[in-house]
């Protein structure tokens, strides 16, 4: 067998994930021991790894990076447990983990909000590169730490980091499409339910201060809505979760009918599902009494209607970030990548009933 054949036959983390019946990101996190993975899942992953003879990141990856750790850090804006309830983030991590698996590198999850000296943070993590996912890093703290350590960075819908490549989607343009669709149907009383702040919180009214504290995708999507409805306001959901969207929607809908919005622009499909649930609990019909649009294009179970939304390439975002990381670790230039989104017509919008 040639050297190339031996290299190609080496088991990777992607092989382990397939054998264990889990996603690549889950396999990577289970193998590393970092992150909210159940004992049963961890056992499945480790058993699959043992059966395949996978013992960890490929030594070739460490050699490629001049004897470094062979680990790439993924920094999340929220706590890891909270983040793992977001299917968009999971699909993005899957794309990232699959690309890194081809190199043999492991994936270490870190939270931007980690506190305490016992936590693994960007200041002490043994990583060769870092991927920032939706983070609002303080340039005077975490970003400077990474720069001083000389660690390559790739940002996925995060604040720009100077020369580092950025993987983005057209958040503003996608939301503008949704807002224009509602305007063309005749809606004028339209409200927002936005993604969480930099630190997830309970739902709260959308104020200028909340906007400043919001993650970059939320601010870009607000801009898209205001391109069409300049004075639009609303509520911050606190997190991209159904229950959070439901609580925020009740604050908008449980009011005098003359003050109630005829349409809601939700900044994620899960938030949109919560808004629809809140409307139904209040005896409102969607879409006759309330039109609702989302963002992401993910599968939402038990909705009963096809959601009007825009679809973003979540897996492709992660894969693009993985390719950028590999390029940086090999000493090559890595390009920023901007993805477009696709309007998806559904059954959750109609002209306002007052017309």
Image (cartoon, grey):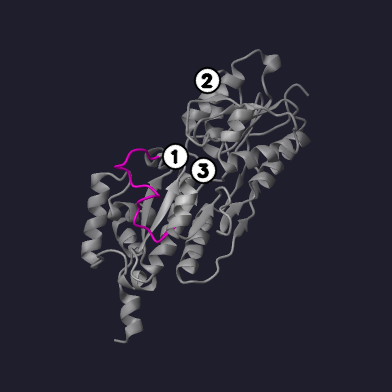
Give percent across and percent down for residue 54.
26, 66
Residue at which label 1 appears: 78
Cβ–Cβ under 8 Å for marks 2 and 1: no
Q: Which mark is residue 301?
A: none
- Establish if 338 lies above or below 4: above
Q: Is residue 18 left or right of residue 195?
A: left
The residue that appears at 73% across and 30% down in the rendered structure is 351
Q: Residues within 10 Å of mark 2 (few under 14, many from 20)?
A: few
Q: Tell me where residue 71 sits by quadrant.
A: bottom left
Q: Nearer the viewer, mark 2 or mark 3?
A: 3
Mark 2 / mark 1, whichever is N-terminal: 1
Residue at which label 2 appears: 281
Q: CA distance from mark 2 to mark 1?
A: 30 Å
Mark 1 / mark 3, whichever is N-terminal: 1
Instruction: Look at the image and say whether residue 274 sits in the magenta stretch.
Output: no
Helix, strand or loop at label 2? It is helix
Q: CA distance from mark 1 to mark 3?
A: 15 Å
- Looking at the image, which is closer to me, 14 or 105? 105
Q: Is residue 89 left or right of residue 334?
A: left
- Establish if 99 lies above or below 26: below
Instruction: Look at the image and say whether residue 117 sits in the magenta stretch.
Output: yes
Give percent across and percent down for residue 241.
48, 34
Cβ–Cβ under 8 Å for marks 2 and 3: no
Which residues are drawn in magenta?
A: 114-130
- Establish if 147 lies above or below 83: below
Residue at which label 3 appears: 138
């Amino acid at each position: 067998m040639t050297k190339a054949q031996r290299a190609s036959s080496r088991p990777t983390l992607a092989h382990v994930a397939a054998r264990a019946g889990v996603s690549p990101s889950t396999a990577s996190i289970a193998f590393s021991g970092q992150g909210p993975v159940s004992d049963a899942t961890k056992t499945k992953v480790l058993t699959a790894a043992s059966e395949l003879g996978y013992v960890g990141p490929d030594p070739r990856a460490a050699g490629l990076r001049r004897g470094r750790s062979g680990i790439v850090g993924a920094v999340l804006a929220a706590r890891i447990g909270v983040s793992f309830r977001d299917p968009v983030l999971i699909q993005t991590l899957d794309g990232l983990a699959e690309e890194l698996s081809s190199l043999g590198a492991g994936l270490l999850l870190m939270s931007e909000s980690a506190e305490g000296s016992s936590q693994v943070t960007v200041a002490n993590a043994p990583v060769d590169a870092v991927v920032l996912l939706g983070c609002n890093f303080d340039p005077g703290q975490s970003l400077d730490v990474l720069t001083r350590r000389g660690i390559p960075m790739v940002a996925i819908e995060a604040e720009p980091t100077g020369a580092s490549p950025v993987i983005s989607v057209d958040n503003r343009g996608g939301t503008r499409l949704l807002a224009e669709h509602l305007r063309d149907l005749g809606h004028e009383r339209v409200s927002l339910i936005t993604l969480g702040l930099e630190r997830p919180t309970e739902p709260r009214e959308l104020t200028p201060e909340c906007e400043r504290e919001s993650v970059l995708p939320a601010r870009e999507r607000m801009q898209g809505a205001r391109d069409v409805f300049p004075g639009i306001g609303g509520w911050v959901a606190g997190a991209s979760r159904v229950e959070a969207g439901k609580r925020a929607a009740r604050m908008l809908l449980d009011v005098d009918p003359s003050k109630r919005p005829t349409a809601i622009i939700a900044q994620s499909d899960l938030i949109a599902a919560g808004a629809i649930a809140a409307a139904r609990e209040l005896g409102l019909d969607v879409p006759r009494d309330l039109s609702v649009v989302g963002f992401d294009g993910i599968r939402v179970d038990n909705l009963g209607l096809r959601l009007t939304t825009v679809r973003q390439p979540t897996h492709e975002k992660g894969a693009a970030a993985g390719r950028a990381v590999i390029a940086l670790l090999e000493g090559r230039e890595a390009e920023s990548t901007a993805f477009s989104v696709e309007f998806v017509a559904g059954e959750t919008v109609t002209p306002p009933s007052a017309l």
